[in-house]
Image (tube, rainbow, N blue to C red):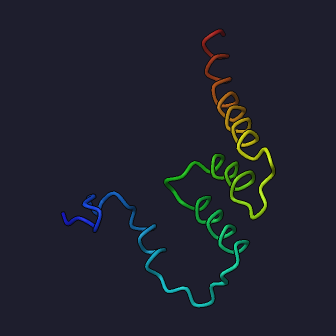
Amino acid sequence: MGQDETGAPEEAATPDMLAALAAPQVEQADTPEVFLATLSETLKASDDVDVDLAGILSDHLLTVTPHANAVANAKAAIVALAAKRVAPVEEQADG
């Protein structure tokens, strides 16, 4: 029932995230490539994160040299994912 330094309840962070942050990094390279790759894999492996959305973020935004239209491309991919997920529900309602 304690609170962290920001005053937010400790339960706000998942135990897995806290363990990953607290774990000693034995051989952590300080390159942006390694950091972003590790972040991407951590997001995809988390139970509390949408894997498809994490993949979109990894592909478009979590890169060392993002494309000039990275945000627009990510938005388009997210909209396409949303449309794909909604399609079966609409088809069932019509049928």
Left or right, 23 with reference to 15: right
Whole-percent x, y for residue 32 in the image: 70, 72
Q: Nearer the viewer, residue 50 or 37?
A: 37
Residue depicted at x 65% and y 9%: 94
Residue 34 drawn above or below residue 65: below
Query: For the C terminus, which image quadrant?
Result: top right
Q: Among all residues in the image, which is located at the extreme bottom?
A: 26
Residue 64 drawn above or below residue 72: below
Quadrant of the rendered image containing residue 18: bottom left
Query: For the N terminus, which image quadrant?
Result: bottom left
Q: How many marks?
A: 0
Residue depicted at x 27% and y 58%: 8
Residue depicted at x 34% and y 57%: 12
Quadrant of the rendered image containing residue 38: bottom right
Left or right, 16 with reference to 83: left
Q: Among all residues in the image, which is located at the extreme front?
A: 68
Residue depicted at x 48% and y 74%: 20
Whole-percent x, y for residue 86 in the image: 63, 25
Residue 21 drawn above or below residue 82: below
Q: Among all residues in the image, which is located at the extreme top?
A: 94
Left or right, 17 with reference to 70: left
Q: Nearer the viewer, residue 3 or 54?
A: 3
Whole-percent x, y for residue 14 in the image: 39, 62
Whole-percent x, y for residue 55 in the image: 69, 52
